[in-house]
Amino acid sequence: MSASGTADTTRWLVTGAGGMLGREVVAALTADPAASVTAATRAELDLTNPEALLAAVRGHDIVVNAAAWTDVDGAEADEAAATVVNGDGVRHLAAACAAAGALLLHVSTDYVFPGDAKEPYREDDPTGPVNAYGRGKLAGELAVAELLPETGYTVRTAWLYGAHGRNFVATMLKLAATHETLDVVDDQLGQPTWARALAVRLTELGRAALAGEAPAGAYHGTASGQATWYDLARAAFELSGLDPERIRPTTADKFVRPAVRPAYSVLGHDRWSAAGLPAMAGWRDELEAAVAAGTFAAQA
């Protein structure tokens, strides 16, 4: 756990600081001279330890929770263990924020929705997760809403990729070196989202919240537009100078996995206007920026 800054700056705590998103949030805040950042990795701060959370949150103005059980199929095999982290752990963190008077930005998922919609899910649409991971994440959302009705912010994201950790885009580009063609699912819709862009949005929301300009509640932190995994893989190849025709469409039933995936994970972005912020950029624009920034160079 590390800290930087002075007493007159805004004091941020980032949990899950060693993960793909957490590392990007820390980098975005470190570049801000008005922010004092405490970066807590999973090894340094356990969401299942209420006493440790109380001590860690104390003295901070705002917490960004990027810590989670992220193994979707593993959650299906052991839902109780996953929910201890994604549900109970978030409840402990929300309670610690309430005790310390700190705001909480909690990162959640599109998987809280059933995936059977025909138009983008609104922030206040009924939830209905179809897998264990989604049920655990929904429990965390409900805890934030219950314990921090005025100071809790849930930011749902989806289809994240970035420079750190395993992700779909990096995997596709790595497989390009060993496979002439790749079969990729073309019947699931979502919003590919660059972790760095989401990190910047989280810091923007945090500042707006501290200034009293953003109402508490749910926001959707995904890129604009929509794509299938097939669309995303083709775009990644094209933008990386590879032949997109090497990507071939297939259907989800060809890849049987323990946890059901929602077929439709497109989220609406209406609430950003309430925080004085625009919707995030289009998914292809984000991907183009990510490739130009060398995001996948070390992973290929």
Image (cartoon, grey):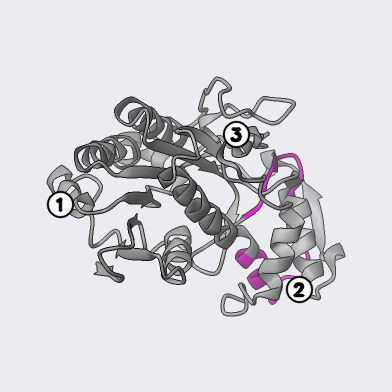
Residue 253: quarter of image: top right
The percent coordinates of residue 299 (x first, y second) are: 57, 75
Task: Note whether 117 is above or below 14 in the view shown.
Answer: above
Circle 3 residues within 10 Å: few <14, some 14–19, many ≥20:
many
The percent coordinates of residue 125 (x first, y second) are: 58, 22
Label located before the other in sequence (1 or 2): 1
Label 3, secondary structure: give it.
helix
Seen from the viewer's position, the closer of residues 26 and 5 is 5
Distance (Cα) linking label 3 and label 1: 33 Å
The percent coordinates of residue 231 (x first, y second) are: 78, 52
Residue 28 in view of the camera? yes
Q: Mark 1 points at which residue?
A: 55
Apparent side of residue 90 relative to residue 24 in the rendered image (left or right): left
Q: Which residue is drawn at 36% across and 62% down?
A: 17
Label 1, secondary structure: give it.
helix
Circle 2 residues within 10 Å: few <14, some 14–19, many ≥20:
some
Residue 182 in view of the camera? no
The magenta stretch is: 170-193
Q: Mark 2 points at which residue?
A: 240
Amino acid beneath label 3: Arg
